[in-house]
Image (cartoon, grey):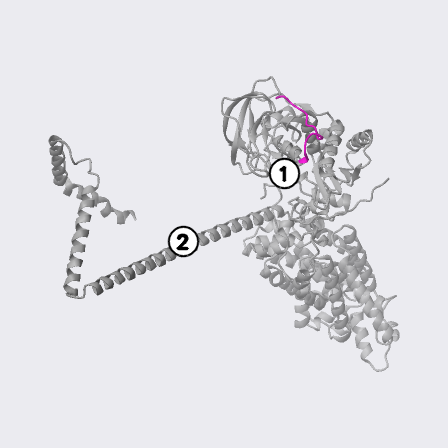
Amino acid sequence: MQRKLFKFNGGVKPATYKTDSTREPIKAVPLPAQLIVPLHQHVGGTPYPLVETGDVVLKGQRIGAADGNVSSAVHAPTSGRVVAVEPRVMAHPSGLTTLSVVIEPDGEERWIDCEPISLRAMSPDQVRDELRDAGVVGLGGAVFPSHLKLKPANGGTDTLVINGAECEPFITCDDLLMRERAEQIIRGAEIMQQLLQARRVLIGIEDNKPEAIAAMQHAVSARAAGSMEVVAVPTRYPAGGAKQLIRVLTGIEVPHGRRSTDYGVQCFNTGTAYAIADVIDRGRPLVSRIVTVAGNVERPGNYEVLFGTPMNHVAALAGIKPGTDRFIMGGPMMGFRMPAYDVPVVKATNCILVGSPELFPPPEPEIGCIRCGECARACPADLQPFELYWYSRAKNFGKAQEYHLFDCIECGCCAYVCPSHIPLVDYFRFSKSEIWARERQKHAADVARDRFEFRNERIEREKREKAEKLAAKTAASRAAASMAAAAAPAGTSDHSEDSKKALIAAAMARAKAQREAIAPQNTEALPPDQQAQIVNADAHRAAIAPADGNIAAQPTEKSPAEG
Amino acid sequence: MSLNSPYLRKPTSVTRVMAEVLLALVPAIAVYAWFFGVGILVQIALATATAIAFEAGFLKLRGRPIGRSLADLSAIVTAWLIALAFPSIGPWWLVVAGTAFAIVVAKHLYGGLGQNPFNPAMVAYAVMIVAFPALMSQWPGAGRLDAAAQLDLIFGGARAVDAVTAATPLDSLRTGLRAEGSSVNALLQGDGFGLFAGRGWEWIAVAFLIGGLYLLARRIITWHIPVAYLGSLAALETIASIAAPQSYPGPVFSLFSGAAMIGAFFILTDPVSGATTPRGKLIYAAGAALMTWIIRHFGSFPDGVAFATLLMNLCVPLIDMKTQPPVFGHKTKN
């Protein structure tokens, strides 16, 4: 039966460059000398380290524990020794560092005791905790902790979408995974369906992957799961965007800022489904993934890579060609240039794209926008990128937000088609970060103002309270005095004079006693010879004091010239 | 220069877009030269040279890269449209002054490529027809003038105009209709008229239509503006000719006369000065059709396309603002 498919507007059809990396099966990677495992590899809280330098770890041992619920654990990708827990350069264009566990492999690949998880024996909440502690996050690139997405929606989950579209050029890791390991993907999808209590599962694959579609269809029919269906979707970038794929398969458009679960749909990448089956059926946490190596290499292909493996270690296996000037993590449309060649492969690394000026020539110089509207026709979010560009350029961020800047998914279609070669996405990234920075500033200013106002108020209140206390005290003593005066009516004025003087004398005596009671200095109560030394030293100091004064004066005379 | 994604770029450029537009104008220019002689070719050469000179000069004054900006060909598109809008036997300085005005005032004083709110070619036409109404109304008749006579009119001093020039079909129809007891049908039998519109002019319009369809096929323009413009104009003319058949020539004559075809495919579709949203384009083009119709029948200028375009250019910011298409997902709010 042919399923009715829906369309999303826009999109582009760049050359796919996919065939070269699909000729050979997924290959293994020899252990590198060191694995650099960043603790923060996902959206959410940074896990805290569970190991120290010198610890011996087993493959699959937890080395970073989830920090709170919106976080995920991190594991030792192989057995070996922890040689450092220190900040290392991240797989991020910023070039910033992040706390990482550096492991020297012992070459034995000794696993922890892996115990399969019984879905029957555990409550769904327990299963979700297991997935969190097994480090399962979205492997399509968003790396959002999966356990958070595996709760049935309030209104019930209708459709679980498994995303095997893989629309970016060059990337074929999901394609190969589906061709070779379809059964386990389907098994993972079943587990997810069970946790979500989803009515049906739709597996969307772009129709340029007939082998993957056949393999997945075979696996589905072998399991005789009636509620699961493999759907070929038209090849058009970005059909693999979660919202675009949901639209194509179900006709539902999930607006920006809303979750697909509000519409009864949940979406996972094929790699994530595969990883979940690994956790449940084999008790193995997430320690590796499939990574495509493509671009300026002799033999493009796919590799099963342990997290923490330096990218150049993997890319070297494919034969890096001369002229390479960068590594891009991800595809050519949305990927990011890496700050170094030896940054580690992380959970988000679906592709190491080896770049060269021949392959990705520098863009032609940007010229004026002629408002031709090509970008608007290409935008899958139905935005008007040239208007956003206009307002971003003018730093009119309010208007940019009015024109739905934050609905932009940075897919790059607009910049791809622009005849004026305007790097539109860069403008939008700039605007977004400016708006975020301003909001942070505004927030900080609000907090500071609140604190200042609170402090002022507190000081005022304390003053007021003090004054009130004082007033009450004076009133009380006045009342006492007038009572005493009433008791002794004769010679009142003389009496009060005397009592005042007596009070002052008593206060002075108290003060003197207090001064004397203060702990003596270390120069006091010394033996006589030391006392004499001190007196000598003081005399000497007094003698040289004028000279000191002259020296000190010199820089002051100089200072105008310096200024 | 961008070092960020996307690293892939479609092989496209403003130069390519403009070159396609120039290519699409070629059939009409050929037909024009065939019916009316070499005048148009001389005018195109004059306008092109003027446009390049002033474009280069102003780029230099503004400190912009000259070679790269000239290579976008946008000034040449403006020049060709001006040459096609001006009478092909006008004196040389008419088209030169118009083109210079378009490049300097209508384009660079507003900020150059992409910044001009008004269509530069139409600004040139409007300024010149207001300043030199007589010269801008002297058109050649089909096959009446040989090359020497045309060159003499363009470059020569004295102009014995009335003997050799003619009004445009639109103009002569309107003038004719002012006479007592005249009728459209009788007037259309006259010398300057052909099968379904002006003699010669009708085939130029057909050539513009062919060029426009080429632009549509090449996805340089979208269907919205030509369809809305020609459709609205045809509808107005149909209604008018049904209501008063003696005074209105009907839709076919109107669409294939004057600047309706070049306007629909080459002038109103200028993306810089035109509306950009799909709904906005329909409103913009329909408005231009209404203005054209009003100016043609009730105004005193030979044609209404230029003023209609400029008036609608004024409305573009408002039209675009009010016709923003719904963003992905915002239709399904609940």
Quadrant housing residue B298? bottom right
Q: Residues within 10 Å of mark 2 (few under 14, many from 20)?
A: few
Instruction: Give the camera-side residue of B225 and A210.
Output: A210
Q: Main secondary structure of the magenta part?
A: loop
Can you tell which mark lies on residue A144?
A: 1
Q: Is residue A349 visible?
A: no
In the image, is A115 to the left or to the right of A525?
Answer: right
N-term-proximal mark, 2 vs 1: 1
Instruction: Give the camera-side residue of A75 and B110.
Output: A75
Three-letter amino acid code of the residue under disc 1: Phe
**Which residue has dot 2 on it?**
A455
Three-letter amino acid code of the residue under disc 2: Arg
Q: How many marks?
A: 2
- Quadrant of the image for the C terminus of chain B? bottom right
SS at circle 1: loop
User: Do the residues at pointers 2 and 1 share their chain?
Assistant: yes
A547 over A470 or under it: above or below: above
Q: Which residues are magenta?
A: A112-124
